[in-house]
Amino acid sequence: MDPAEPAAVSLVTVENLQGYVLDQYLGLVQALGGSAAEATKALEVRALVRARRAYAEAARRRTATAGSYVVLGLRVAAGINASGQPVWVAYGTLARGHRGTH
């Protein structure tokens, strides 16, 4: 594993994280689960896979840079599927950035 390859993704509920300088939006990520915790964990896993894929693609183009991957604007919602079972969805915007300097 490349030392700069993402090993974790942070989940935050705000859209603008103070001190975080955004380099690139990678898109919406979402995941379903039987509970809010399951949906959130599934979102974390899915976001990490997507972050690693984005990093690998950038490395192939030789534009890869180290950065922090964050799911901004994390939201969790509940609903009921067609069979009457509860379903939870977690979603947010995956972004890459870095800590800003003052």
Image (tube, rainbow, N blue to C red):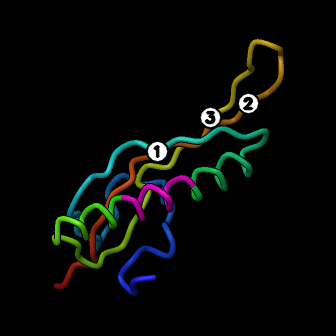
Q: Please, is residue 74 above or below residue 4 in the view?
A: above
The residue where tag 3 is placed is 77
Q: Residue furthest toward the front?
A: 60
Q: Please, is residue 88 above or below residue 52 in the view?
A: above
The structure residue drawn at horizontal position 17% and vertical position 72%, both measured from the top left corner, is 62
The residue where tag 1 is placed is 29
The structure residue drawn at horizontal position 28% and vertical position 79%, both measured from the top left corner, is 66
Does residue 4 show up magenta in the picture?
no
Q: Please, is residue 62 above or below residue 78 in the view?
A: below
Looking at the rendering, the stretch of residues picked out in magenta corresponds to 46-53
Lower position in the chain sequence, tag 1 or tag 3: 1
Q: Are marks 3 and 2 in contact (CB under 8 Å)?
A: no
Q: Where does the image place residue 1, in percent across and percent down from the top left?
A: 46, 82
Lower position in the chain sequence, tag 3 or tag 2: 3
Query: Callout 1 environment at 10 Å: few (<14), some (14 to 19), or many (20+)?
Result: some
The structure residue drawn at horizontal position 27% and vertical position 68%, both measured from the top left corner, is 97
Pick the front one: 13 or 89 = 89
Q: Please, is residue 50 above or below residue 30 in the view?
A: below
Question: Residue 17 occupies which quadrant of the picture?
Answer: bottom left
Circle 3 or circle 2, nearest the eye: 2
Pick the front one: 38 or 1 = 1
Q: Residue furthest toward the top?
A: 82
Query: Which quadrant would the C terminus be assigned to in this image?
Result: bottom left
Q: Are marks 1 and 2 in contact (CB under 8 Å)?
A: no
Per the model, the C-alpha gap separating discs 1 and 2 is: 17 Å
Q: Where does the image place residue 83, in percent across and percent down from the top left?
A: 82, 14
The residue where tag 2 is placed is 87
The amino acid type, in three-letter code, at marker 1 is Val
Query: Callout 3 environment at 10 Å: few (<14), some (14 to 19), or many (20+)?
Result: few
